Image (tube, rainbow, N blue to C red):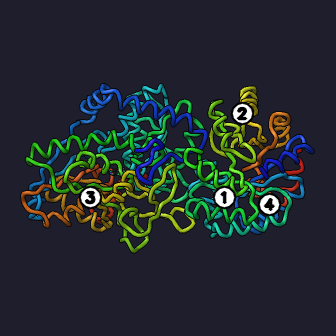
């Protein structure tokens, strides 16, 4: 409930919320710190921190490379948990972990949840853990007030959306299109119909991610969703223009 | 298998939501095929006419005499069209793709044999075809890349991660989630999310069904042991299924690389370096570090150079129904050398792993016992690697001369 309430409260004050994403340890934790400061200072409502994994199946080339470079630089799960704790203690917005299931599985489901809880993390996004495989884990997370955030895809039927909603907490993450992260999404009538189906399926806040890149994309979601997710775009920006470019970019989105 | 696709602790379907419907459709189509006796008939007829099945079970008289123990029989999957057992799985999935009405197939490949077979199937059935192959494997299996392209497939070298089989699998999944409406991912081994492990094993079971019949015809009774190399586990599952319920010892041979203590190997079930994990859509024993990051693997054989293993084999290992051993790169070259000289047969580097273990054990068995080695494929594809390993002077001269010619 905690995450859902926080987002709904923020949403009362804004047309659309912003969630940003970054890969921990890429290019370094020090740069992560600077990026997060600029994100928070420029009004980001929620931050998704990806714990890198060597096989990020659902990610496109930009985030894939960030995962690999972070691991090559020696990033560990323990360091990510500690960094998450530091951020959650420093800023008054929700921080989430995004990762693949093996990271959690190998750490130990219960131990991971306890560590995330102790770090002040309020939600988890695990794209390769559908409820059929992770139902028990999702219940364990909820018991600890960590929201299991489920992803809905354009290929999900109405029945499937209802089923996913039954497991979800915090918010629902609507993937804007088929495919992996990083490519531009086209917003047309088919997309808006899909968002309307998502809206009917849940009373949780709706976040939309995959390919959101600029102010127009964010504006197009107003009235149709509650939160826009910016992923690969900031990673590319930091690669090309350095961490200082993040603040002005975030400020330009709303 | 349980409803969710588990075999004991292993398996499952850890897939992103975008694939949920696609897997439902695939599961339904597969269930229908299994319940329809005419499907298996259509499949075996296709394999007889297009791929020389049943493949022979060859009695290796000279090798048997050389080791002086068990009678050695070789199941000749090398004589499939395209030169390996991979064709069995691919043609079966091709029939399912036709039934699903899809028009494009994609596949990962390590040794290139699965990519080759998929490109062949796509050409025959009129599908568009894209093959993902690690950059390292593109280099070590150049002849297969040439043929795949000649059959009209697009071969995409994968430059991420360790640039081998697992990275090709990730890249194929990325293609699939983007193009799932018209595309089927022809998974190449008995791994991945359910129903792939079971489905691929089912198509490969044609090997064991034939071998069980052939050994009784030729030897008069069942073999004492059956040997197969284990990459993802499809040729092993294929031959083992003919003997699972019999008093026959089943031996899976993994890639020992430079040795189990070297860190440079791909032994998941017989070494000490693997642990339970979930990646590439399924749960099994993976070669990974304490954080769950996959490790680099090594084998002279591209098709065995993989971090995971069939969840069905992990379960059979738990149940002690299959014994797992490993063969090092140098043992593999020696066994290959002996087999060529004594029998005039050229096993693939992958298959040669099974030969190594059989050779180690043949003399322990009595003369009236038989063993079967599953020869998963032929070695022609490995000509560059094998010639290099033998440091063959005349081959080198030829390559240098040809290179000079091209340079002009
Ligand atoms: C000839 C041959 N044998 C064996 C393998 C290993 O695969 P599997 O363990 O699925 O049979 C390969 C894979 O590429 C192969 O080409």
Compared to residue A69, the image places residue B203 above or below, namely: above
Q: Is residue A129 visible?
A: yes
Q: Residues within 10 Å of mark 4 (few under 14, many from 20)?
A: some
Residue B79: image location, x then y, percent: 24, 43
Q: Chain of mark 2?
A: A
Q: Position of residue A97 (x, y in %)?
A: 70, 57
Label 2, secondary structure: give it.
helix
Residue carrying label 4: A242
Q: Chain of mark 1?
A: A
Residue B98 figure quarter? top left
What is the C-alpha distance between the residues marked 2 and 3? Answer: 51 Å
Mark drawn on residue A117: none
Are circles 2 and 3 on residues that touch, CB within 8 Å? no
Disc 3 crowd rating (10 Å Cα; few below 14, some 14-19, many 20+) is many
Does residue B386 show up? Answer: no
Label at residue A66: 1
Pointer 2 and pointer 3 on the same chain: no
């Amino acid at each position: 409930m905690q995450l859902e309430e926080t987002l709904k409260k923020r949403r009362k004050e804004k047309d659309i919320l912003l969630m940003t994403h970054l890969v921990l340890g890429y290019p370094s934790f020090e740069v992560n710190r600077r990026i997060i400061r600029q994100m928070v200072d420029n009004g980001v409502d929620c931050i998704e921190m990806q714990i890198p994994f060597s096989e990020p199946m659902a990610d496109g080339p930009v985030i894939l490379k960030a995962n690999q470079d972070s691991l090559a630089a020696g990033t560990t799960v323990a360091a990510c948990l500690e960094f998450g704790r530091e951020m959650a203690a420093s800023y008054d917005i929700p921080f989430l972990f995004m990762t693949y299931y093996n990271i959690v599985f190998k750490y130990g489901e219960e131990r991971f949840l306890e560590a995330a809880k102790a770090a002040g993390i309020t939600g988890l996004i695990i794209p390769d853990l559908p409820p059929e495989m992770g139902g028990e884990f999702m219940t364990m997370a909820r018991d600890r007030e960590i929201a299991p955030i489920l992803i809905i895809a354009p290929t999900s039927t109405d029945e499937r959306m209802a089923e996913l909603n039954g497991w979800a907490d915090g918010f629902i993450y609507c993937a804007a299109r088929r495919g992996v992260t990083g490519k531009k999404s086209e917003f047309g009538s088919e997309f808006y119909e899909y968002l309307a189906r998502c809206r009917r399926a849940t009373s949780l806040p709706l976040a939309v991610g995959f390919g959101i890149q600029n102010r127009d994309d964010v504006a197009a979601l107003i009235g149709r969703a509650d939160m826009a997710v910016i992923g690969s775009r900031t990673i590319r920006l930091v690669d090309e223009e350095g961490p200082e470019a993040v603040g002005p970019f975030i400020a330009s989105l709303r | 298998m349980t409803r969710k696709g588990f075999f004991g602790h292993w398996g499952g379907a850890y897939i992103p939501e975008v694939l949920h419907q696609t897997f439902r459709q695939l599961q339904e189509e597969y269930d229908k095929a299994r319940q329809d006796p005419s499907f298996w008939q259509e499949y075996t007829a296709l394999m007889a006419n297009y791929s020389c099945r049943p493949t022979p079970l060859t009695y290796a008289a000279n090798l048997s005499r050389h080791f002086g123990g068990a009678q050695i029989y070789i199941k000749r999957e090398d004589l499939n069209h395209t030169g390996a057992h991979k064709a069995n799985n691919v043609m079966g999935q091709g029939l399912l793709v036709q039934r699903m009405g899809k028009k494009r197939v994609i596949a990962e490949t390590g040794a290139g044999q699965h990519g080759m077979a998929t490109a062949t199937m796509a050409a025959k059935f009129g599908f568009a075809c894209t093959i993902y192959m690690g950059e390292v494997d593109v280099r070590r299996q150049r002849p297969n890349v040439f043929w795949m392209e000649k059959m009209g497939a697009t071969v995409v070298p994968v430059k991420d991660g360790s640039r081998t089989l697992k990275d090709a699998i990730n890249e194929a999944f990325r293609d699939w989630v983007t193009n799932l409406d018209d595309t089927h991912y022809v998974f190449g081994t008995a791994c991945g999310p359910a129903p792939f492990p079971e489905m691929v094993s089912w198509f490969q079971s044609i090997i064991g069904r034939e071998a069980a019949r052939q050994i009784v015809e030729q030897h008069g009774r069942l073999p004492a042991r059956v040997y197969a190399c284990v990459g993802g586990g499809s040729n092993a599952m294929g031959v083992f299924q003919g003997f699972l319920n019999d008093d026959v010892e089943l031996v899976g041979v993994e890639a020992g690389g430079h040795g189990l203590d070297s860190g440079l190997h791909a032994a998941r079930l017989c070494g000490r370096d693997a642990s339970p994990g979930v990646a590439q859509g399924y749960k099994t024993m993976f070669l990974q570090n304490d954080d769950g990051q996959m490790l680099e693997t090594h084998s002279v054989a591209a098709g065995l150079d993989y971090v995971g293993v069939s969840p069905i084999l992990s379960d059979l290992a738990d149940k002690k129904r299959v014994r797992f051993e490993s063969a090092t790169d140098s043992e593999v070259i020696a066994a290959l050398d002996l087999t060529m000289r004594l029998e005039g047969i050229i096993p693939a580097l992958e298959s040669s792993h099974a030969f190594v273990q059989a050779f180690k054990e043949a003399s322990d068995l009595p003369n009236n016992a038989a063993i079967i080695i599953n020869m998963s494929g032929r070695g022609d594809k490995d000509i560059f690697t094998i010639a290099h390993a033998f440091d063959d002077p005349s081959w080198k001269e030829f390559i240098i001369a040809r290179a000079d010619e091209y340079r002009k």
